[in-house]
Amino acid sequence: MNFISILGAAQGAVAQGLLWGIMTLGVYLTFRILNIADMTCDGSFALGGSTCAVLVTKGYNPLLAVFISFLTGLVAGLATGLMHTKLKIHEILAGILSMIALYSINIRIMGKSNTPLLGVDTIMTKMQEQFGITPNIASFIVGIIFGAALIAALYWFMGTELGSCIRATGNNEKMVRAMGVDTDKMKLLGLMLSNALIALSGALVAQQQGYGDVGMGTGTIVIGLASIILGESIFAYFNKRFAFYITLLSVLLGSVVYRLIIAVVLQLGLKSSDLKLLTAIIVVIALAIPVAKAKITKKSLLSEAR
């Protein structure tokens, strides 16, 4: 085992984790705040990457391409939200239908299954040329800037009346509806915002890895959930004692931890084909941590009572 190679892999993993962490923030909005398991994210992540790749190859400004990808994510979330709220299709089925449809749409957008970004300007390559830094450092800086800006924006938005209604809808939908809030609109807005963030993440990842691919979003929901659970488990102490922005930060850092685990395990010799199995194991372990903590606390309280 080469320590230098592990260190190099860890550097790339941190940069990649920050970019994927934006996707995790989007998954967090539906999974934790709205209490919805939205399967659209697998398609909307690839939608952002595909849209961005095509626009960049056509000469569009990379930042403008990211913004347009953000807008396409809004549309994807809108489609899922309308199926769920207006057509009364179950949230999971609505997400699956959108995900399936987006596979064909993404191929339509690119005209093929893969669009390389070789020889074109991206946010990362422009930073490398201007500041003379490595690709990993450029990706790290971009991830920090976008991650910090989005956490600040989400923290502000969730503190507004509209954001509070979205949070309340996920917490107690019946009570919020009794107070006169249109919960369907809150779900619709939450799904749109979530998928917009996921598509934005896909756009940044496409620029970082140098191509947009129709299958780049496969397993996004599992990766997002693994990152959320890891972040919540590792930073649980801070989540209970500090503001909501710490929770958002822990979700972003959970993505970094997930990528670090993957990078180290790959350096130890695990085959890339086993990554899905590893992800499932990570999720199971992370879910088991709070249960184990609760049992230990219960036993200690019982022993003290005796």
Image (cartoon, helix red, strand yellow):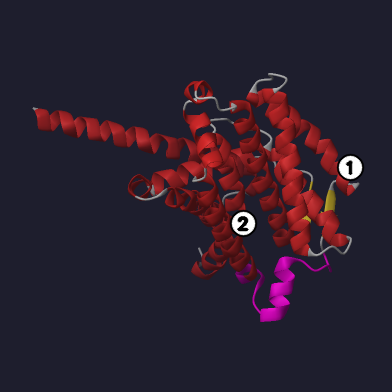
**Image check: 12 left or right of 119?**
left
> Looking at the picture, how far across and down is residue 82, in whole percent?
72, 28
Q: SS class of the residue under badge 1?
A: helix
Residue drawn at x 72%, y 67% is 123
**Image check: 123 left or right of 252?**
right
Residue drawn at x 70%, y 61% is 208
**Tag shown at residue 19:** 2
> Looking at the picture, how far across and down is residue 211, in whole percent?
78, 57
Q: Is residue 103 above or below residue 249?
A: above
Residue 96 image-quadrant placement? top right
Residue drawn at x 69%, y 30% is 81
**Quadrant of the image containing the C terminus:** top left
> Looking at the picture, how far across and down is residue 302, in whole percent?
16, 28
Queried whether the magenta region covers residue 150, the answer comes back as: no
Residue reaching furthest front? 180
**Image check: 208 left or right of 263?**
right
Residue drawn at x 43%, y 44% is 232
Mark 1: amino acid: Arg
Queried whether the magenta region covers residue 131, the answer comes back as: yes
Magenta residues, start to end: 118-137
> Looking at the picture, how far across and down is residue 76, in whole percent?
74, 38
Is the residue marked by circle 1 packed among few (<14), some (14-19), or many (20+) residues within 10 Å? few
Mark 2: amino acid: Leu
Task: Give the residue pinned by disc 1.
Answer: 108
Q: Nearer the viewer, residue 211 or 62?
A: 62
Q: SS class of the residue under badge 2?
A: helix
Q: Is residue 293 above or below residue 263?
A: above
